[in-house]
Amino acid sequence: MISYMSASSARGLIIKDVRKNFGAGDVLEKMSLEVQAGEFLCLLGPSGCGKSTLLKIIAGFDNPTTGEISTDSGEDLLSLSSAKRDIAMVFQNFALYPHMSVRDNIAMPLIMRRLTWQQRLPFIGKLLPGTRLCYAGIMQEVNDIAGMLKIAHLLDRKPSQLSGGQKQRVAIGRALIRKPSLFLMDEPLSSLDAALRNEMRTEIAELQRSLGITTLYVTHDQTEAMTMADRIVILMNGKVLQAGTPEEIFNSPSHLDVAKFISSPPVNVLPAEAGRHGIYVMEQHIPLSLSGNITEKIQLAIRPEDIRLTLSEPITSTRLTWSVRILRIERTGHEALVHVATMQGSRLTGRLNSDALKNFIAPKSGLISMSFDVSSIWLFTESGERIYHNCLLHEVAIPEPRSALP
């Protein structure tokens, strides 16, 4: 059977001050990142943020303008050709050889590595000493990989005879058979349908954990990142905005762009103002003690699932309520998204789970009470930096007049 390295013998990766410039603009701006050996790291961000560019630089298909990339043992990858970096990559478009069978597609990396050019010649090559024995060993490894990926019954087919998911498994098998120390995946599931994406992301995550190969996975889908990765790196405009576990990224975003991107649908953002006794949002007062040097204008973010929509809701010091008008209700079966507009002109989205949806009846007037708990909000500066609030000022429980804002 084919054997793989354990997580303890896998290679880590150190990226230091990598910058990539195309013309007048920087695609990557002094990016620094450390990938632990055996880790499944997800690079998450919108199109054009530099994810694929970074992967190409690591693989050796492109060179950085400045910066260093090395393994955790100190080996300089930039001084090596792409063939000598011991890196395998799965592309977004699969990149299979259409004239070859599945068996030959998977075997190709080992054929190129283990056989001489004379041994690779058709007809004559198989007559040379050692060719048959080497080829038999390669085919045994192909069979082992195909069995692992559940495509053994497809080995004699051509890529044109395969479904999208089957093609993806072939591409993964071709990469894995090399036993790489670093595995790069560039949005490998983006061309698959939703049901197949769900199936494949589970299989890829389980395969990576069983093999222990250090993996960098590029995606723009937050669900893929949250469900597959050990750690997520959020990239925006060539910069690392935040790096952490899925739980850290989801529960404590350090930037408004992170909070928007990691939430589906995006977080609701409301304009607010900060004062000595807390903040004001849509003519209501939240008695929060803010940390740091806070300017007057700030932004408040609240997730759709943290918004409560009822026929009436009392206002308290910890829960604020507004009268809003329902614009549209999107039902997805087990839940619903309710789009509303406030009297101040802001538009928000609330999510009703299955329990809340059972008892929800939209009033004929379209007017409903919207509320959220103060503990569920995030605060950000105008530029998007996170503002941390220390505690609720219970001694200021009664809303102050608007003129109290300094």
Image (cartoon, grey):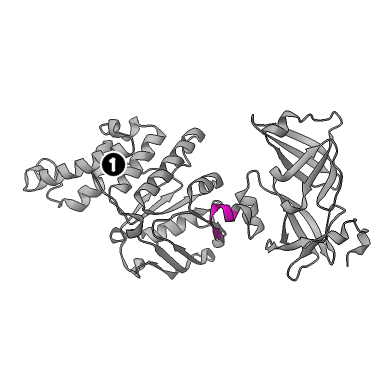
The residue type indicated by label 1 comes to Ile
Residue 95 drawn above or below residue 279:
above
Residue 56 drawn above or below residue 70:
above
Residue 228 seen in render: yes
Pointer 1 residue? 145
The residue at 30%/58% (across/down) is: 86
Residue 75 x, y percent position in the rendering: 33, 69
Query: Residue 318 or 191: which is nearer the viewer?
Result: 318
- Which quadrant would the C terminus be assigned to in this image? bottom right
- Please state the extent of the stretch shown in magenta in the rendering: 243-249
The residue at 47%/39% (across/down) is: 191
The answer to if 40 sits in the magenta stretch is no
Q: Locate residue 299: give its quadrant.
A: bottom right
Q: Is residue 362 left or right of residue 333?
A: right
Question: In what element is the residue under mark 1?
Answer: helix
Residue 129 x, y percent position in the rendering: 6, 48
